[in-house]
Amino acid sequence: MSGVISRLSAMLKGGKISVKELIEAYISRIEAVNPLLNAYVYTTFEEALSKVDSMQKRIAEGASPLAGIPFALKDNICTAGIPTTCCSKILENFRPCYDATVWSKLKAQGAVLLGKTNMDEFAMGSTSESSFYGAPKNPVNTACVTGGSSGGSAAAVKAELAAFALGSDTGGSIRQPASFCGVVGFKPTYGAVSRYGLIAYASSLDQIGPFAQTVEDAAIVYDAIRGKDEHDMTSACGKAGATDLSCDVKNITVGVPEEFFSDGVDEEVKSAIEAAICLFERGGATIRRVHFPDLKTALSAYYVISCAEASSNLGRYDGIRYGYRAESYADIDEMIVKTRSTGFGAEVKRRIMLGTYVLSSGYYDAYYKKACLIRSRIRAAFRELFSGCDILITPASPTTAFHLGKTYSDSTQAYLADICTVPVNIAGLPAVSLPCGVSKDGLPIGMQIIADRMCDSTALACAHYFEREAAVSVPLSSEVAL
Ligand code: GLN
């Protein structure tokens, strides 16, 4: 499937459409559809329109494939002078004084920002329902959630309210909403993309990545944002040159870890993934049934580590430095307590408390230290698997999109649904999620392709092969169809 970005870029370069016409077309689509979907929480139409003339000139000069292409950013990516709220009351009205590296890079390549997208508060969640601005709706079925936490970005791309979008993935927040909305979501190797300017949730797991309609688009965006950044000491160089999407499937060994297909996984999801594996086999790939016994432990370790890091990262919101401050208080201590207790939502407070508990003296060894040991074991298990396989194929999520309101009331249920995605973050690996089928209710089913560290192009190339061979299409709900 040729990508939206290359198609639009060719139209712009060939003079079939002007940047102004393109941006105006996206703006009117957002105005028509966003009131229903709530994918954007803030739009930057004025700034976008003020750029069109200079972009038009750059296109004439033969600029990057992203010149003039409209896109969206998750609302936890800092944009100087433009609200960046993490969809939390505590950052209401916060306008950062600097740009995230990914936003600077996209700006430098001429991409045009249309706005900031909805998300779970501080990226904590799997449905985007904990947003201070209310939940976004799934463009495939508006009675369903978009997934989370980057639900607004997934919905915006699926509903064609942006040609592409960026999200962040700490435990699955790009791959799971991509799976729920029927788009491509890519979580790069930890460090491949700078985190500078990404508001931290759990710094050792957080990673920025693209949402797109096709794998080719995701690769173009990935190439535009990746690379070493002096502002982020954990960032790495990666391979030079554009990501190579050519894939000789005959030389590929696909590992299928059986534990990812256990009881909690829907039958429809299992059979769609098995059909996808058969497609690789028919193409000449070697299929190996393998094991990942630590899958359940990975989930527990993730919730210990991510909450521990969150409790530390979110200590900075005290009513003094950023955004919201409680209105009445007797002294500074009361101000901080009131600001934090009324500024954060229930899920964020739950995680701060959990994180503080697992780091407290007396419990540190029993929980946090143990989780770190499990982390080393999980890394070793993946190393072992990748000594005999090029990629691993698993479901991106055990189920299709939940109905709105169904899981939000039950945190444990929501945590369990992250089981397929969190091991990848714990080991810092690259993984792509892409549609591989549609359920009998018409909801998209997502497949996850995991590759070894710094083998991002292997994951993308295999996904590209599958996308071309399978040609899965996931129709939009009639309410939002073009
Ligand atoms: N659903 C996971 C969580 O709630 C993942 C979140 C994320 O990747 N930001 O923590």
Image (cartoon, grey):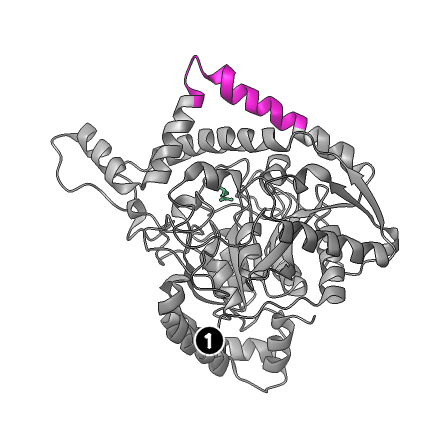
Q: Residues within 10 Å of mark 1 (few under 14, many from 20)?
A: some
- Residue 16 can be seen in this image: yes
Quick check: 306 above or below 180? above
Residue at left offset 81%, top offset 36%: 387
The x and y percentages for residue 291 are 74, 34
Quick check: 481 above or below 425? below
Along the viewing direction, whichever of 98 and 353 lies nearer the viewer? 353
Residue at left offset 64%, top offset 79%: 10
- Residue 432 can be seen in this image: no
The quarter holding residue 179 reads: bottom right
- Magenta-drawn stretch, dominant element (helix, strand or loop): helix
Judge: label 1 CB < 8 Å from ligand 1: no
Q: Is residue 374 magenta?
A: yes
Check disc 1 and report the residue beneath it. Answer: 26
The x and y percentages for residue 95 are 33, 53
Span shown in magenta:
358-377
The x and y percentages for residue 217 are 63, 65
The x and y percentages for residue 269 are 63, 52
Residue at left offset 38%, top offset 63%: 38
Q: Is residue 455 magenta?
A: no
Residue at left offset 72%, top offset 39%: 258
Residue that sits furthest to the bottom in the current view: 16
- Left or right: where 169 falls relative to 42: right
Quick check: 61 above or below 415? below
Which image quadrant: the N terminus?
bottom right
Secondary structure beneath label 1: helix
Q: Amino acid at mark 1?
A: Tyr
